[in-house]
Amino acid sequence: MPTLTDEFIEQAVHEYQSLQESRIVEPSPFFEEVKLRHAAVMIPLLIHKGDWHVLLTHRSQNLVEHRGQVAFPGGAQDRHDRDLQETALREMYEEIGISPHDVDVFGYLGDMRVVSGYVVRLFVGKIPWPYDLKINPSEVESAFTVPLKWLSDPNHRSVQYRSYAGHEFPVIFFDEYEGHILWGASAEMTLSLLTALKLVN
């Protein structure tokens, strides 16, 4: 496992972004007739008890989309947002009260298309910890952290197949961690982060 420093993470994120943007995106039957909306998430990194963690949220059951799921802070781009980084920072502030001024943004990992009709830009940033989170109960039930070391262990994840729009496709599931299960698009985003940081092959 590489030694994770701020400098290493920033360089790794930029290298991964460049790699993703140079790839040719293959057509997918899931998006043929869907007009994708732009969205962004922030993958918050922090140091807790000497180890790097990611911060995740458990979404409210009252939401229309992705209710009750484990996710990174984020959402659709607002017409007032200057860019997608502002979208990610604004959404994180609205959901869990982390001020944009307290986030050291390393960059982004590229864009990911998700079946709910969004193309999501994956930003990565470091936040101070501990932090006085202000949970917005209309959007988030709780927030929690998971060590990168635990997430990078291949024994803690598996692939299952799900049907959508008449097609079978693989879905990543992480094992339950302190009562939370990370799966689907957020699990795929997590795997992108782990790959960028060379924590998985």
Image (spheres, rainbow, N blue to C red):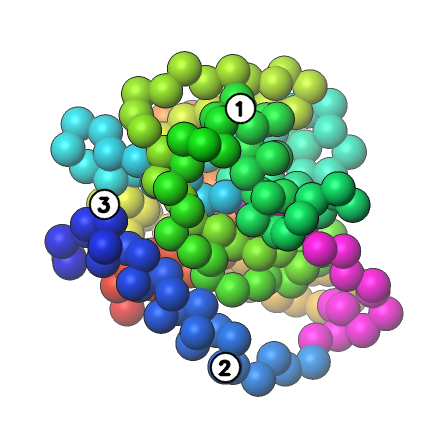
Q: Name the disc covering residue 149, or none.
A: 3
Does 173 appear above or below 95?
below
The residue that disc 2 covers is: 22
Report how far apart the C-alphas of labels 3 and 2 lie in the structure: 29 Å
Nearer the observer, disc 3 or disc 2?
Answer: 2
Circle 1 residue = 96
Separation of disc 1 and disc 3 at Cα? 24 Å
Is there CB contact under 8 Å for labels 3 and 2? no
Amino acid type, callout 3: Lys
Q: Is residue 19 left or right of residue 1?
A: right
Of the numbered discs 3 and 2, the one sitting upstream in the chain is 2
The residue lying toward the viewer, choosing from 36 and 90, is: 90
Q: Quadrant of residue 54?
A: top left
Callout 3: 10 Å neighbours few (<14), some, many (20+)? few
Q: Nearer the viewer, residue 35 or 178?
A: 35
- Residue 8 in the image: state x and y as whole percent: 22, 58
x and y percentages locating residue 164 in the rendered image:
73, 60
| Residue at the (52%, 75%) spot, across then down | 21
How far across and down, in percent of the image, does residue 153 sit? 25, 51
The numbered mark, 2 or 1, whose residue comes first in the sequence reads 2
SS for tag 3? helix
Please give left or right for residue 130 compared with residue 143 in the image.
Answer: left
Residue 34 among magenta residues: yes
Is residue 102 visible in the rendered image? The answer is yes
Is residue 98 found inside the magenta-colored segment of the image? no
Give the residue drawn at x 78%, y 45%: 79
Q: Position of residue 177 (x, y in %)?
A: 37, 33
Q: Which residues are magenta?
A: 28-41
Q: Nearer the viewer, mark 1 or mark 3?
A: 1
30 is higher (above) or lower (below) than 184? below
Q: Earlier in the sequence, mark 1 or mark 3?
A: 1
